[in-house]
Amino acid sequence: MRICASRKHTFYVSEFTSTIDLKSRKNLERLSNLENERKRRNRLYIIAEILTVAKEGSLKTQIMYRANLSFAQLNEYLSFLIKMYLLKIQKEDGKKIYRTTTKGNKYLEKYKDITNLLGNNEKNFEST
């Protein structure tokens, strides 16, 4: 293994790999960033995911894990969805259960229609 230094960047190169010039490295980084951007979920998708999880009624932690959100993100989304009447809270056995409202189910139907129209490969959210 040898150390290569070029244009302020030091990296290790083994005998089995070839060196990559700085321009090629930057192009690879840009391509990697584009792929990461495509994998990110948008706000509408996350809302649809939360509403789908809460259809039958779910606890806050269940929504957090199934929608793959941090606690801070979850609280932000839940307060927004409740204010918009897409989600409601019901107390059952002393626990707060989050349920999708009729308006929330309409959102899911419209979201599904739009993703189908655009030919989006995102997960389909079916409403019952």
Image (spheres, helix red, strand yellow):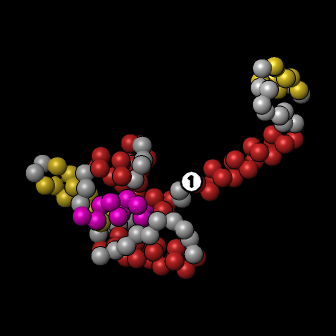
Q: What secondary structure is the stretch in magenta mostly built from? A: helix
Left or right relative to 61: residue 32:
right
Whether residue 7 is in magenta: the answer is no
**Which residues make up the magenta segment?**
47-56
Out of 23 and 51, give the one closest to the viewer.
Answer: 23
The residue sitting at 83% across, 34% down in the picture is 18
Left or right relative to 57: residue 126:
right
Let me know if residue 109 appears in the view: yes
The residue sitting at 80% across, 26% down in the picture is 15
The residue sitting at 89% across, 28% down in the picture is 7
Quadrant of the frame with the C terminus? bottom left
Quadrant of the frame with the N terminus? top right
Out of 62 and 105, give the one closest to the viewer.
Answer: 62
Rendering coords of residue 127 (x, y %): 34, 74
The residue sitting at 81% across, 20% down in the picture is 3
Let me know if residue 89 appears in the view: no
Out of 74 and 119, give the one closest to the viewer.
Answer: 119
- Check disc 1 and give the amino acid type: Arg
Left or right relative to 54: residue 21:
right
Give the residue at the far left of this rendering.
Answer: 93
Provide the secondary structure element on which disc 1 rests: loop
Rendering coords of residue 99 (x, y %): 26, 62
Which corner quadrant of the image does residue 14 belong to? top right
| Residue to which mark 1 is pinned | 40
Rendering coords of residue 84 (x, y %): 38, 65
Out of 106 and 12, give the one closest to the viewer.
Answer: 12
